[in-house]
Image (cartoon, rainbow, N blue to C red):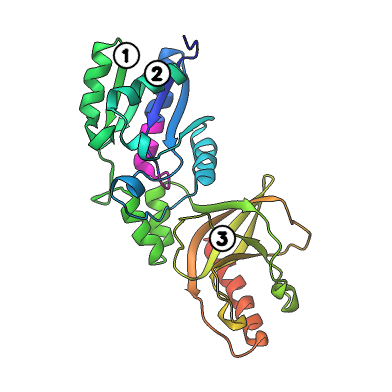
Amino acid sequence: MNQRKTVIALGFFDGIHIGHGALFEKTLERALELEAEPAVLTFDNHPDNFVKHERVELISSATDRVYIIRRFYGIQNVFFLHFNNATMRMHWRDFIERIIDAYGAVHFVVGHDFCFGYKGEGTAEVLRHYCLEHDLSCDIIPPVTRDGIVVSSTYIRSLLLDGEVEQANAFLGHPYLITDNIRTGFHIGRTIEAPTINMMLGENVLVPKHGVYATKVRISGDKRIAVTNVGTRPTFNGDRVTVETNILDFDGDLYGRHACVEFYSFIRPECRFDSPEKLQEQIRRDAVRARKLLSE
């Protein structure tokens, strides 16, 4: 028998917004009461890819979800289940008992609309009754609203696609962010005196509105103001989406280092310039704008 004792928050948790935060806060509270480890159990890919045969663009990659849960909520145990056709067809009771056996779960925390098991027959209320029958316990978290709007990953996706990053951050409860190891790019930035660090969005991860953002970059605990371009670099005839960040007042080799880019404000749409020199002038203006926005 598993000797581990955990309180587990169950869900996919795309983006990790303030609604998910309510689950995590309750998980921490119950773990303290029950002298158990707080934990989050999620899936490596979105269930709707199988259940509804829909490609879901994610706010956050699996790696970023782990980063956010650990950094902003302090829950170190983040477990992943592989979601495939076998998982989709699993009976809800088998699903729950597998978690209990594998992780020593004694308490579950779920959202009001959480469904699991074959055809979604496992609901939050089904889980509650199962827990009552098996000497376990369960919390069901009601919808969380902000400004009269129910907080949801779907709504936050729409905000990011429109470049409404300040509003998205308010619903996320933290800055929209991307983490990655810094990659070798095209070295174009150095030719116009604006060297950038280059990152890639994960597979099936949503691309926010193309354009320039006021951002902050966190590397090994050091945090600096930056300007980030999301797009295809039309001035240089680019053809694939990149995330290129110019860290202000910094010059150094960061290749291979792990970075977190936090988005705070949308400055302007991406556009094509007639020459690299005109782009360079605009980059200087973007830097001034970013400093002003982030100082406010």
What is the C-alpha distance between the residues marked 1 and 3?
44 Å
Q: Position of residue 98 (x, y in %)?
A: 39, 22
Which callout, 1 or 2, points to the residue nearer the camera? 2
Residue at image x 69%, y 71%? 186
Query: Going from the N terminus, do you reach mark 1 or mark 2 first?
Result: 2
Residue placed under numbered mark 2 in the picture = 100
Is disc 3 placed on a helix, strand or loop? strand
Task: Decide if residue 223 is on the left or right side of residue 253.
Answer: left
Q: Are the residues flagged by discs 1 and 2 in contact, CB closer than 8 Å? A: yes
Residue type beneath disc 2: Ile
Counting every numbered tag in the picture gives: 3
What is the C-alpha distance between the residues marked 3 and 2?
41 Å
Residue 15: say if magenta. yes
Q: Position of residue 185 (x, y in %)?
A: 69, 66
Task: Decide if residue 96 is on the left or right side of residue 45.
Answer: left
Numbered range of the magenta stretch: 14-24
Task: Decide if residue 260 is on the left or right side of residue 46.
Answer: right
Q: Position of residue 290 (x, y in %)?
A: 57, 67
Front residue (pair 276, 183)? 183
Numbered tag placed on residue 136 in the rendering:
1
Q: Is residue 158 above or below residue 122?
A: below
Task: Decide if residue 256 is on the left or right side of residue 211.
Answer: right
Residue placed under numbered mark 3 in the picture = 215
Q: Is residue 289 above or below residue 54?
A: below
Query: Going from the N terminus, do you reach mark 1 or mark 3 first?
Result: 1
Q: Is residue 165 above or below residue 15?
A: below
